[in-house]
Amino acid sequence: MLVELTVNGESRSANVPPETTLLKMLREYLGLTGAKLGCDVGDCGTCTVIVDGVSVNSCLMLAGRADGCDVTTIEGLATADELHPLQQKFEEHGALQCGFCGPGMLISAKNLLDTNPEPSVFEVRDALAGNLCRCTGYTKIIEAVIEAGEMMNQEQATV
Amino acid sequence: MATRVKDVQTNVEDLVTAREARAPSRQPLAVPIDQPVTFPLELPESEARLRTPAVGQRATRPDGRLHGLGQTQYIDDITFPHMLHAKILRSEYAHARIVSIDTSEAEKMPGVIATLTGAEVPENSFGPTYQDQPILAYPIARHRGDGVAAVAATTEQFALDALEKIRVEYEPLPAVFDPLEALEDDSPKVHGGDTNIYTSKVIKKGDVEAGLAASDHVFERRFSTQMVEHVPLEPHATIASWDGNGRVSIWSSLGRITLGREDLARTLQMPQSRIRLIGTVVGGNFGGKNEITNEPIVALLSRKSRRPVKAIYSRGDEFVSSTIRHPFIMDYTTGVDNEGRILARKIRLVLDGGAYCSWTGTTIGKGSILAPGPYNIDNVLVEAYAVYTNKTTTGAMRGFGAPQVCFAYESQMDDMADALGIDPLEIRLRNGFSENSLSPTGQSLQSVALKESLTQAADRFRWKEWQA
Amino acid sequence: MKKRGRGMACMWYPIGFTVAANPSAATVKVNTDGTATLLTGTVETGQGALTVLAQIAAETLGLATDDVHVVSGDTDVTPMDTGAIASRTTYVTGNAIVRAAEKARDILFEAAAPLLNVKPEQLEVRDRRIQVLGFPARSVAIDKVVHHSETVLGNPAIGSASYNPPTVDMDPETGQGKPFNTYVYATQIADVEVDDETGEVEILKIVAVHDCGTPINPMLVEGQIQGGISMGVGFALQEEILFEEGRQINPNLTNYIMPTSLDMPDIEVGLVDNYDPTGPFGAKGAGEPTAVPTAACIMNAIYDAVGVRITALPATAERVLTAINEKRAAEQADAA
C-alpha cells in the first residue's frame, strides 16, 4: 500500500506491505534509522517519534495509520547550521552514554517542551517515564531538558 | 488528528494482525530516498575540549553529539545489499537430549537460504574460563535459552516462520533449578559427573573459629539475591560477511574484540588473520556483551548462504539466552567485641551458575575476595561454591558479585551497630581500611580512600544531624 | 503511614582482572600539524571511554582533548586490548596510552633539543608547545617539531606500548596473594520513605561519594555514578527474573520492571580527592563500583524506617510488607 507522510517537514512516500509498522517504514523504506527497535512492544521508548503532535511508539503503529500525518523524528531536530537546544544541552551535560535511548528520549523531551515550555522536574520525569535508559540514571537527561527549556524560552523572549 | 493517533496507539489488534499477517507480498520494495537527511557539519567545539591541560576537563563526547543527532550507526542501522536475517530456535526443555533435528521443511519455506545446527559448528564450544557452552546445543540442551538451530532468510519474518517448521525430537532429562538442591548428591547433574559444583574458592586468614570464640557477640544471618538482567537498550547484534579471499568481517556488539576474535578462530577453526572483528558503537553492555553469543552462528550462516547475514536478538532472546547476574546465597557469621571491632568473619557463598560457566570464575573470585567488606579483620574464612542449574547462564554483570556481597556485609554491619548501640558511621570508621591495611588475601592496600568517602558522604548528607 | 529512614553502605572494588593477565596495548601517532591519532582495541560501550582515553593521550602530549582523534575497536586496525570489562579501561588502557604517547613525545624531545639548545631530558610539553623545564620562555610549537622530525629528520612521532597490572597469584588453599594492583572505595547514603501499610519504598535521595583516583573527566564520572545507582535501585527494589520449571516467565520489559525516570531519586555526587601513583595521572576507575553499595544502603534505610531487615532482594512492596507484618505479629506475641 502507498503511504504518504510529511516527515520532518518534507513529503515522503513509500509502497509498503500493509503490516509494516511506522518504525519499519521510517528505518527501512525512508532511510531514517534514528528511531531504534529496542523491544518491539512499546515498553522501552527507543522508537518514539511525534505524529501530529503526539509522541508515539512507532513500533506499535502501523505505517498505514500514519498516512497523511505529520511525523517528526530525531533527524528533524537539528538544522544544517545548528543543533536543537535539547541536542546542545544533552551534549554539554554528557546526558547520553551508550546513546541507544537518545533519539526516543530527545523526541519525548521535545514533545514535552513543545506543549509545556517551563516544565517542573517532576513533569520532566513524568514525560520521560516511557523512555527507558539503562546507562545514565536519567539525572543528566533531566538537567539537560530543564536547561534546554530555559534556553528556548530565552530565545523566544529575545525574538 | 491527535485523537486519531491515540486510537491507533491503543489498538493492539492492529499489531497482532500485523504480526500474524502471512501475505506473500512481504519482500521489501526498494524505494529511492528522495531527500537526504540534513545534519549540521560545522559546529563549534565545547570549551572544555579545547583547553589544556586535558586531564580534569569536563570534555564533551564527539560520539555523544552523534547519539543526539540520531547519526550513530549501531549494528541494526547497518545494511548490506542482499543481506539476510537470522533467527535462532531455542530449546523446548530445560534439560534434554536432542535425538534429531530436521530442518528440511524449514528449508522449503519462502525466503529461506540457509539453516544451521550444532553438529555443523566446527568447534561447538566456547566460554571465557571453561569452554563448556555450545554455540548451538547438540546433543544436550541444558537450559531453555540454548539455541538448537538457526535460519537465515531474506526477511526476519521469513526466518521466524521457518523456525516453526524445524522438527526437533527431544528426550527430556531430569533437571535441577535450585542451587542448594543442585549441591545435593542425588540431584540431576547438569554436565554429568558426580557434582554440579564447577568452581570454588577459599580465602583463609588467621583462625576464624578462635576469633569467633573470643568475640563478645556473634551475629549470624543468611542473605540471598535474585537473577537480574543487564537490559542493554540495544540487544545483542551481529553482521557477518565473507569475501572472495575467504576472510570474514564481523560487526559485533561485543565489548572485547581481541579475545572475541580468538574465540571465533577457535569455534570456526580458522586463522585469526582471516577474521576481522569490528566492535561498533555498543548500545549498552554492563557485562552482558563480554563473550561471543551469536557471532559464530551468523558467520557460518553467511558462509553457507554466501551472503551478508544480520542477527539482532529480540528482547526475549536477550533475557533468556544472554547471560544474567548470579543469584548468591550468603551465610554470614561475624564476631565483634563490645566496642564493635570485628574479630572474625566466616562466610559461605553459593552462586547459582545457571547452565554454563561463562564469567563465573571471575565472579566467584571477586565475590570471595570482597565478601568480608572493606574492614580490618584478622580472622577470615570465605568458602564459595558455584553450581550448575538448568537455568539461564549467569555471567559478568557490573560488579562481578560485589553488589551481592556488599548487600550482605553492609546489612550485617548495621545489624551489629544497632545491637551494640553504635552509630552506623562510627562502626564503619572503627573497622574500615586505611592506608597499608591488609586485605583478606594479605595484600597491603595503597591509595585507600574509604574513610574519606564515609566522612564526606556523611557531611554531605548531614548524617550527624539525622542521628541526633 | 509513611516512615522516613536513612541508611549508609560503603564498599571496596578492584580494578582489572583477578590475578589473570589483562593487558592493553596502544599506538599514538602525532600528526605534522600537532594533532594526534590514538589507536586502541577497546570498544566504546557507552561510558565515554574513548573521550577519557583521548584526554589521557592529550595530557601526555601537552595537547587539548579535541586535538586527539581516537580510532577503536577493529581487529584489522587497532592493537590488542582485553576490552571494556572489569572497570579496567581508564587504568589499564590508560596506562598503555601514557606509555605509548611518552614514546612519541620522546621522539619529539630528541628533535626539539637541538632547536632549543638543551638536552632532551630538559624538555616538557605544555599548551601545544615543547618548552625547557624551568625556563618556559624558551619553547617551540609542537607542530613545528613534529613537522621537522618527520619531514627533515625522517623520524615520525609514533609510539606503541602496552600495560598489564602486576599481580601475585593466590594460594589455592588460603587465597593469599595480590589479585589486583589497585582498588577504589565508596560510600552511598540513602534517604527513603516506607509506607508501612503497603510496603512501598520511595527513595528520596542518595548521596554518593566515590574514589576513582584522579577523575580524568569529572562529568563522565558523575554519569557513571548516577547510572550505577539506577542499576542499584533496580537490584534493590524492582528487578527479578522469575522462573517456572526453568522457564523465564517475565522475559520482557512489561513484566521485568527496571527503573524509569520516575523511580530515580535526587542524587548528590561527591568525589574523594585521591591520587593513585600507579594509574594514568593518578586515575583508577569508575565503571562497576558505582552500582555496588546502592542496594545495601537502601536496605539499611528501610531498616531504619520500619525496623525490618530485608534479607532477600529485591525488596518489593510485597516482601517489605510481609516483613513488617511478621514483625508486628512477633511484637504482639511478645506482648501477650
Image (spheres, rainbow, N blue to C red):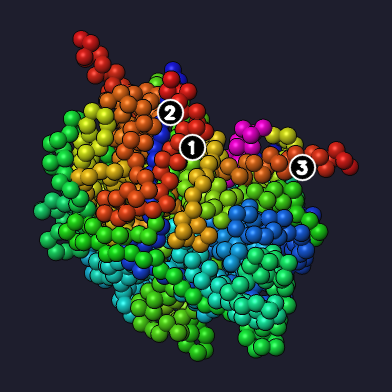
Residue A54 inside the magenta-drawn segment: no
Residue on which disc 2 sits: C6
User: x%, y% of residue B193?
Assistant: 14, 64
Q: Which residues are magenta?
A: A120-133
Check disc 1 and report its element: helix, strand or loop: helix
Residue on which disc 1 sits: B456
CB-based contact (under 8 Å), mark 3 and mark 1:
no
Q: CA–CA distance between discs 3 and 1?
A: 34 Å
Q: Would residue C132 appear left or right of B300 to someone viewing this image?
A: right
Residue on which disc 3 sits: A151
Chain of residue at mark 1: B
Mark 3 is on which residue type?
A: Met
Q: Quadrant of residue C22?
A: bottom left
User: x%, y% of residue B111?
Assistant: 50, 73
Q: CA–CA distance between discs 3 and 2?
A: 37 Å
Residue C43 numbered tag: none
